[in-house]
Image (cartoon, grey):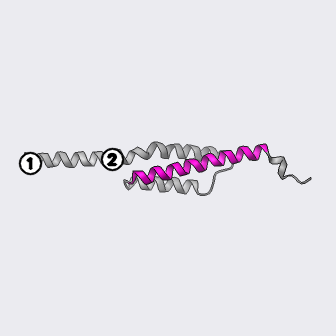
Amino acid sequence: MKSLKYCLIIVSMFSASICVAGAAEPLIEKAEVARLKAAEVGFEWSTTSILIAEAKQAAEDGNNELAEKLANAAIKQAENGLKQAAFSAAHWQDSEPR
């Protein structure tokens, strides 16, 4: 009976760690989608894909807090790239010689 208790504890600990590691996955996926949108318009920042890769690694290592932080930073960079593209499209004539 005692060994059954220990087995249940170990199994529950293992399954809990799997759930926690997967909690950052939606943010990482959102970051990847945002990165692709920025890349489509030619304004993907050079560090965005690095942040996403680091977020994936942190999630695999079970560091969910770091994974979420990195994914959020990647999302912010991708969104800023999209803002940069919109600004560039609206103000392209400002860079033309007069």
What's the residue type where badge 2 is placed?
Ile
Could you tell whether 98 is left or right of 8 in the image?
right
Q: Is residue 26 above or below residue 77?
A: above
Count neighbours of disc 2 (C-alpha within 10 A) and say few if under 14, some if 14 to 19, many if 20 or more.
Answer: some
Q: Earlier in the sequence, mark 1 or mark 2?
A: 1
Residue at the spot 44% in from the left edge and 45% down from the top edge: 25
Mark carried by residue 44: none
Our reading of the magenta stretch's main secondary structure is helix
Q: Does residue 7 appear in this view?
A: yes
Q: Which residues are magenta?
A: 63-90
Answer with left or right where residue 31 lies relative to residue 24.
right
Q: Is residue 80 magenta?
A: yes
**To which residue does mark 1 refer?**
2
Q: Nearer the viewer, residue 83 or 18?
A: 83
Amino acid tagged 1: Lys
Query: In the rendered view, does 55 fall on the left or right side of 13?
Result: right
- Percent from the top left, x then y, of residue 91? 80, 46
Relative image position of residue 9 (x, y in whole percent)? 19, 47
The quarter of the rendered structure image containing the N terminus is top left
Q: Residues within 10 Å of mark 1 (few under 14, many from 20)?
A: few
CA distance for labels 1 and 2: 25 Å
Q: Residue furthest right?
A: 98
Q: Residue at x 25, y 48 (%)?
A: 13
